[in-house]
Image: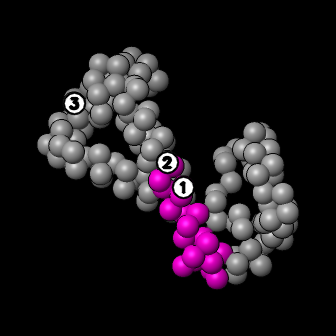
Amino acid sequence: RLGGRAALVSLLGLDMVADLGLEQQIDTAVEFANAFGPLAIVGFLGAWCVAKVFLLDFLSLGLALSSGVLFGGVLPGAFLSATGATLGSSLSFALSRGQLKQRVDGALAKQPVARGLAKVVEEDGFRTVFVLRLAPILPLAPPPYPHH
């Protein structure tokens, strides 16, 4: 757990952790997760799915930053975060293609820019999404909903 805690403390800044008393809160969160055992991993992956489906970027950030602390270091935490983000993105894509397709189509009809983006993605999906993911024009990756 030292590796994940060190990464989080480094990100937040050592002074901030000490000044705000976050060390105790970090220890409490780790104990809470440990109390659930393997179910903590299931809950963590479920939280990633919720974050991705409902476009809760602040939750995604919190999950990514806390994963190393909660799950035994930077590498196991990064693996679980990548797995959770992939599962959540796959779920949101599946929903947009299935049960929520009519709702997504209705939202696209109201927004000309989104409609244009969806049309370009339809014509040349992989390259368009690849370029959009690299382009600094959009501060965050476009959600999977408009990609038909």
Image side of residue 42 versus residue 34, left or right: right
Image side of residue 72 versus residue 10, left or right: left
Q: Is mark 1 on a helix, strand or loop?
A: helix
Is residue 9 highlighted in magenta? no
CA gap, disc 3 to disc 2?
A: 25 Å
Question: Which residue type carries mark 2?
Answer: Ala
Residue 39 is situated, as x and y percent measured from the top left of the image, at 22, 50
Image side of residue 112 versus residue 148, left or right: right
Of callouts 3 and 2, which one flags the residue occurring earlier in the amino acid sequence?
3
CA gap, disc 3 to disc 1?
A: 30 Å
Magenta-highlighted residues? 86-104
List the residue tagged with mark 1: 89
Instruction: In the rendered structure, find residue 56 and report the number of the disc placed on it.
Output: none
Residue 77 is situated, as x and y percent measured from the top left of the image, at 38, 33
Can residue 102 be seen from the camera position used here? yes
Q: Is mark 3 on a helix, strand or loop?
A: helix
Instruction: In the rendered structure, find residue 85 and report the number of the disc placed on it.
Output: 2
Image side of residue 92 versus residue 102, left or right: left
Instruction: In the rendered structure, find residue 27 and report the number of the disc placed on it.
Output: 3
- Which one is in front in this view, the residue at disc 3 or the one at disc 1? 1
Q: Name above or below for residue 43 compared with residue 137.
A: below
Q: What residue lies at 29% left-to-right and 19% top-to-bottom?
A: 2
Question: Which residue type carries mark 1?
Answer: Ser
Q: Name above or below for residue 98 compared with residue 130.
A: below
Q: Determine contact: label 2, label 1, CB under 8 Å.
A: yes
Can residue 59 be seen from the camera position used here? no
Bin the neighbour count of mark 1 within 10 Å (Cα to Cα): few under 14, some 14-19, many 20 and up.
many
CA gap, disc 2 to disc 1?
A: 6 Å
Bin the neighbour count of mark 3 within 10 Å (Cα to Cα): few under 14, some 14-19, many 20 and up.
some
Per the picture, the main secondary structure of the magenta-coloured stretch is helix
Q: What residue lies at 21% left-to-right and 45% top-to-bottom?
A: 38
